[in-house]
Image: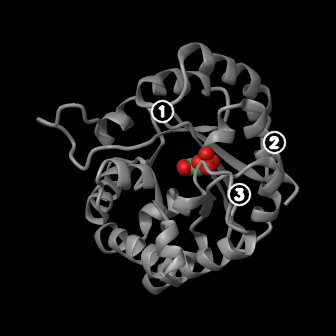
Amino acid sequence: MGRKTFVVANWKMNGSYKANAEWLQQALPALRTTRAACDTAVCAPNVYLPQMIEGLLTSTTMVGAQNCSEHDQGAFTGEVSAQMLADIGCDLVILGHSERRTLFGETDSMVADKVKRAFENGIMPIVCVGETLTEREEGRTIEVVSRQLKAVLDTAGIAPFIGGALAYEPVWAIGTGKSASPEDAQAVHAALRDVLAQVDAQAADAVRILYGGSVKANNAKALFAQKDIDGALVGGASLKAQDFLAICECAECN
Ligand code: 13P
């Protein structure tokens, strides 16, 4: 089935009012033109979400956060809930990013609870899975990413993935300049789609599975040409508007 390519910027903990305004100024003309072949989103730090939501109003580009709480409200100092993200007009949230899992101790079950809560509040999750270098060298890639995905499916079902997306991000490829080869990434994406299909074959066919990890304009085209690679979650290269747009253009000639 035809899954529309989805290119998502993950700015991580980068940006400023001034830098974001410049990014918007540079990207908006291109983002405003209807992109028949490509959906786009920008996931910014929470404090800049209102700036990005307002700045992107005249485009179809969605705005996302990079994490949310598994609770709606209460005594959780420093946390932001999916309900609050919905309240300010946010569309998406990245959940289970490897930096959250490794640096902030997020477990499979916490990620699953967050996905459920986000979906219940109308915030579409982009759920990240990925193996470390050691796990890959031990030949455990499929086992690890399947376990991470199944934890979410058991708690939240497949519906959140249809409006949102699944992202395969090998940890060893993030910010290192080392991207998985298109063929290796395709093999993992196909295995992930099989796991989704065990829940609902028809729905699995509609889920967009993004690749993340050192995606640039010079490797995006080959990645997007793979059958089960439906877009990209872009870190470093999304910080410059021109680089992000160049990746989006790779979807258009797909
Ligand atoms: P880089 O594109 O900088 O490797 O980051 C990937 C990533 O973590 C996106 O979520």
For residue 201, say whether it is visible: yes
Q: Nearer the viewer, residue 141 or 251?
A: 141
Question: Up-down: is 211 above or below 214?
Answer: below
Report the coloring of the rendering.
one colour
Residue bearing the label numbered 3: 5
Q: Nearer the viewer, residue 27 or 205?
A: 27
For the residue carrying disc 3, how many other residues have a C-alpha within 10 Å: few (<14), some (14-19), or many (20+)? Answer: many
The amino acid pointed to by label 2 is: Ala
User: Helix or strand or loop: what does disc 3 sit on?
Assistant: strand
- Which label number is shown at residue 194? none
Residue bearing the label numbered 1: 13
From the viewer's perspective, is 16 left or right of 35? left
Whole-Å distance between the Cαs marked 1 and 3?
25 Å
The image shows residue 195 at horizontal and vertical percentages of 48, 82
User: Helix or strand or loop: what does disc 2 sit on?
Assistant: helix
The image shows residue 101 at horizontal and vertical percentages of 36, 55
Q: Quadrant of the N terminus?
A: bottom right
- Which label number is shown at residue 246? 2
Observer-side mark, 1 or 3, equals: 1
For residue 8, say whether it is visible: no
Which residue is pictured at 64% across the width and 38% down the height? Answer: 61
Residue 191 occupies which quadrant of the picture? bottom right
The image shows residue 83 at horizontal and vertical percentages of 30, 39
Residue 237 occupies which quadrant of the picture? top right
Which residue is pictured at 44% across the width and 81% down the height? Answer: 143
The amino acid pointed to by label 1 is: Met
Which residue is pictured at 68% across the width and 75% down the height? Answer: 184
For the residue carrying disc 1, how many other residues have a C-alpha within 10 Å: few (<14), some (14-19), or many (20+)? Answer: few
Q: Quadrant of the C terminus?
A: bottom right
